Image (tube, rainbow, N blue to C red):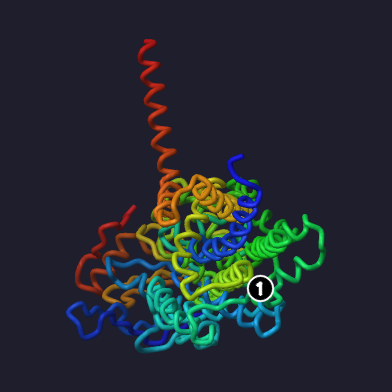
Amino acid sequence: MLKLNNISKTFNPGTVNEKRALNGVTLHLAPGDFVTVVGSNGAGKSTLFHAIAGVFYVDRGSVVLDGEDITFKPEYKRSRELGRLFQDPMKGTAPHMTIEENLALAYLRTAKHQHAYFSRTGKGDRKFFRDQLAKLDMGLEDRMKQPVGLLSGGQRQALTLLMATMVPPKILLLDEHTAALDPGTAEKVLNITQEVVAEHKITTMMVTHNMNQALELGSRTLMMDGGNIVLDVQGEERAGLTVKDLLEKFKARVGENLDNDRILLS
Amino acid sequence: MLLSVVTLRTALEMGAIYSLVALALFISFSILNIADLSTDGCYTLGFAVGATVTLAGHPFLALPAAMLAGALSGFVTAFLQTKLGVESILAGIIVNTGLYTVNLAVMGWSSNLSIFGTDTLLSLAKGLSGAKAWTDWSTLIVLAAILGVAAVLAGLFFRTRLGLSIRATGDNVDMVRASSINPAFTITVGLCAANSLTGLAGCLTGLVNKSCDINLGTGMVTVALASLIIGETMFGRFSIGWRIVGVIAGSCVYRIIIALALAANVPTECFKLVSALIVAVAIAMPQGRKLLAIQRQKLLRRKEGAKC
């Protein structure tokens, strides 16, 4: 589904602040893969996501999504096939617009609506939005006319997840999307994530700081360090792995302990 | 009576025209979150184009021509900021400066233009009936009708998918990029729409005043901003429909305050100061309300304290 061929990115080249953020990353994801990504501070996890989403173009290498070379496709065009959630729950929704209006915007991604500039939200659309919201089980379906700014962080993140997956994308990028939520809400959003991903068999990548989560969720785990993937486990090898094993493997590969000030070991 | 009917009528006529500019700023400033300082020049451009087309014998073509000219000016402003990376405020200033020359050129390299004695849209409307009531009120009725059409169209437009995209661009640009909308496109459409309204307002001012000069638009941004803020203070920021109604009401209130100042024999030299005061008071209003509420709470607390 997704192929990264030897991609590199250097920020501020030729200055004292030069930073090789991605250093020849190669990665192939099969359709339906659910990959968890862990790594130390500044390992390049978010940069990798930005490269896939097209926030910047990579210096070298190519990005291929479902057979299409998207290396130089602008960010907004990639968004048609790519869903994204950020750590900050405020980032994914427009606060002064109502829930219904936010959903209508997300719905723009469908082929039917891409060029229907002057179409308005109809009764059918509204019913569809209502049903989708009801699935979140947060009572949002009765608040469709309220501005999103009134919702809690967890509700906003759940809404963003709905907006990103309402039209199932080819790939879903989750950048610590539950890290800013309280434990109860985080679990709920995570459960919804799993349901949605399983339902549509969406190829998913998720950055997390919770090592247990990294092993329990999904089908494959990547560890990153210094702008590269240093560990890639899946299948049986992954099934028997504990957090301790994972950290030891990391130390064996990189030669030092995993250094991350926000890491959760249990 | 504080205001004569004639003064009130004139105030409402001007209010209707200024509403269009305030509506334009509502789109660029409130919705897109862009301070578009090309408003002054664009307003004069609308007048220059409208008057020239009217003088050429096309009174009906004047309005669409002025709107098209305004939209073009908006397109240039948008192009500068979306494609060439010019800071949005600077883009407006650059276009505003350039427009001065463009406006002179459109007016035939003369700094003023008169359309006395030429058939205009408004004079033709007035000529429809000889009744005194009609000749007195026709101008206001035509202006109000144009404003009504513009306001309804704007209200409908901002509920369409393109309209929603434009609103989201001003609200959360990250989200817009992540939902397959090109912000460069939405900013361009928004600024074109806003400036076409400014151009239309300039054209209508010319038709009402029958003569205007190159400095017609000076200070227009401040006036329109004042109207916008008065409207938002009075009506709050709820649904898009109410906000548009608020903008129009704000413009009319602003013109009535000016008319009151005139009726109270405030010398015309003091007018800029009056305008500035109105703007300052309107902007300070929400904060003033907050302070008042706190004082009231304190007073209540003190009373309760006395009881115990």
Residue B269 placement, left or right of A116: left
In the picture shown, does residue A56 fall above or below B17?
below
Q: Nearer the viewer, residue B295 or B260?
A: B260
Q: Name the residue located 56 percent from the left edge and 49 percent from the top edge.
A: B256
> Is residue B308 visible from the viewing direction of this image?
yes
Label 1 is found on which chain of the structure?
Answer: A
Q: What amino acid does circle 1 point to?
A: Tyr
Q: Is residue A30 left or right of residue B118?
A: left
Q: Is residue A207 left or right of residue B180?
A: left
Residues B150 and A256: in front is B150
Q: Position of residue B30 (x, y in %)?
A: 50, 60
Residue B224 image position (x, y, % from top left):
50, 60
Kindly identify the residue that appears in the image at 42 percent across and 46 percent down: B281
Image spot of residue B89 (x, y percent):
39, 71
Q: Residue at x 66, y 58 (%)?
A: A129
Residue A175 position within the rendered picture, expressed as x and y whole percent measured from the top left? 42, 65
Within the image, what quadrant is residue A131 found in? bottom right
Reading the image, the residue beneath label 1 is A117
Residue A200 seen in render: no
Q: Along the line of sight, which residue is nearer the eye, A36 or A133? A: A133
Q: Secondary structure at mark 1?
A: loop
Question: Up-down: is A41 above or below B278?
Answer: below
Rendered image quadrant of residue A230: bottom left
Q: In which quadrant of the rendered view does residue A51 lie?
A: bottom left
